[in-house]
Image (spheres, rainbow, N blue to C red):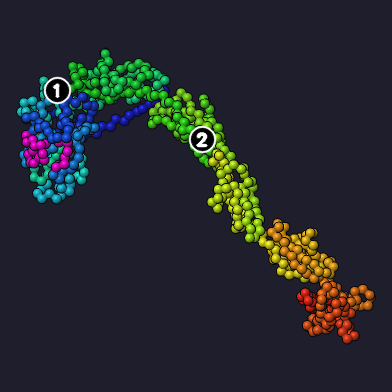
Amino acid sequence: MKKNVNSCLIFILFVSAIPYFGYSQLAFCGGNSGTPVFTEDFGSGTTNGPALPSGVTTYSYVATAPDDNEYTIASTTNYFDWFNTEDHTPDDVNGKALLANGSFQALDYYSRVITGLCENTTYEFSAWLLDLNSEAFSINCEERFSPVNVRFEVWDETETTLLVRGDTGPIEVSNAPIWREYGLIFKTTDSQNSVIIKLKNNGNGLCGNDLAIDDISLKSCGDTVTLRNTDNEVLMLICEDESTAATTLTATPDFTVFSTHNYQWEQSVDEITWVNLAGATDVSLAIPPTNTTTYYRAKVAEDVSNVNNNLCNVISDAFEVRVVPIPQNPVSNGDVARCVSESVPLVVSVPTGVTVDWYNSITGGRLLLKNSTSYVPIVQGTYYAEAVSLDLNCRSNGRTPVTLTINSPPAIAADETVFFCENTTATLNADIEDMRYLWNTGATTKTIEASVAGEYTVLVTDANTCSSTRRIALETLFIPKITNIVSDGTAIIVSTKATVNSEFSLDGITYQNSPVFEVVNTGDYTIYVKGKIDCGIVRQSFFHISVPKFFTPNGDGVNDFFIIEGLDLFDFANVAIFDRYGALLRQDNAPLFTWDGTILGRKMPNNDYWYSITTNQGVYKGNFSLKR
């Protein structure tokens, strides 16, 4: 599968035109460059030196800290108050640079004769410079501070004709070491094959003007040459199980340097070793179908004789036919078993540059989730992960199954309320076997003993680590307490404390819910009271007498007398009758007490009257009505 990749080629030009002779501002090659004709990185090592060959510099070599008009070659800049930093060359170890203590004269920091150049060819001369002094040093300098200022010069091989020069100008000081690159563009003339390049002190000594120089380079400079194929692409991508179609590459120069263009196409499989393609010298190159990563580029020169001379040509941008490997199937992090209430993802692993799509089937099926190495299903089952390359939609040959099992929580008994008698304990039961238990008391047993009313919970966890919580409300049942027993006519009424869920009995065998015993013969009774949940039985003796609620002394022979029954139960009984105002009307010690409603032969009016019966067992009081 192919993927269009369009590039935007951006070049930063420091000047709008490339000078060939005379004075110039510093500038870089605005187009493509060739293989460097010359480089100088000053080597590497932990000891200073060696000194540069005679004639390369007009400064004097020292193996220690250089004073004015002196230099050293070192892997450290840790001298004086200078910045302590590494050289510029990328990826070297203990790399060295030239460290110079600027003089008062315009002496040469560095000068080299470069041979083997091509005539009528544009070149770029560049170097990396570092001001060794900090901004703080420049402010505190006792004398007038002199910033670094370097002149780039190119002379003919006789050093009598200056071809071009440019100045860095005062390099701005900073509070951190900053390597800066500067460049100069020049063009050789007819029959010119050698030049002299120079880096000169353009400062004036004094305080400051100390610098490091590294990675001096000279390389050819030419047009920016871009490569595009028939589909206007600068890159072709294919999956390794596919093959590209035949296409044609075309080189497009921008004519900023060259006026004519000659080509030699090259091919590489690693972008390191390049091989000329025989006969491929046209502006275009037809490339056949392939399923192997391959790179193409063109060497370009103005003169056909220079096209294969790496000291004279420039190299176009490379066009890549990139084969994207088919990713391996994702590696499962393991099947997942979770509880209903949990949210645990299925996870797979893939290398960097690869993502994952999830499906519901080993082949085909429905896409569930794109671009994620994890997936959280809501139902149990097997799900399938497919690897997809990020560069190009290349997919793994298979899918990796990952299974989700959803376990139900333990089926516990319903919440309940448990009653227990005061001053005792209750056994609370999780009511399910072979589980792990955790009560809110901290206990881890199936059952616990509790003596304090309240809510108890137990977390029940099964072998799948799924849990359920059971709640038990524990309530206290208090033992009933008899507070009073009274005779009410023929009835006995029992008053208790905590009568809720109590039962009552006159014989200790037959119990009733009501505390009122209706129509009871007079006599000596034992009253029994217990809770419906048996926390114990309380009992109390009681002498029951029958006092009528009213009598009707009208001479009809029915209920004409107020008769108190049961006084014969007592060893001693005294009855007193009072009117509503508390006046004593009659008092008698007779065990059988009756009253006809008269006092000294006078009929007492219809009204309510009160009685008080004093016995050896206690006092009975109440009221009754007289109705004629």
**Residue furthest front in the image:** 571
**Magenta residues, as a range?**
58-79
> If the image is split into quadrants, where does the N terminus sit?
top left
Q: Main secondary structure of the magenta part?
A: loop
Q: Residue at x 12, y 25 (%)?
A: 114
The location of residue 115, given as percent across then percent down, is: 12, 23
Disc count in the image?
A: 2
* Residue 594 or residue 65, whichever sits in front: 594
| Of the two numbered discs 1 and 2 in the rendering, the one whose residue sits closer to the viewer | 2
The location of residue 366, given as percent across then percent down, is: 53, 29
The location of residue 472, given as percent across then percent down, is: 62, 52
> If the image is split into quadrants, where does the C terminus sit?
bottom right
Q: Secondary structure at mark 2?
A: strand
Q: Residue at x 40, y 30 (%)?
A: 351
Q: Is 60 within the magenta?
A: yes
Hey, what amino acid is under mark 1? Leu
Mark sitting earlier along the chain (1/2):
1
**Residue furthest bottom in the image:** 600
Horizontal relation, residue 245 to residue 277: left or right: right
Location of mark 2 (residue): 336
- Residue 125 in view of the camera: no
Which label is found at residue 609? none
Horizontal relation, residue 475 to residue 300: left or right: right
Horizontal relation, residue 454 to residue 566: left or right: left
* Residue 242 or residue 273, whichever sits in front: 273
Query: How far apart are the alpha carbons under marks 1 and 2?
Result: 70 Å
Hey, what amino acid is under mark 2? Val
The location of residue 282, given as percent across then percent down, is: 27, 16
Tag 1 and tag 2, C-beta contact below 8 Å = no
Q: Is 214 within the magenta?
A: no
Which label is found at residue 117? 1
Q: Secondary structure at mark 1?
A: loop
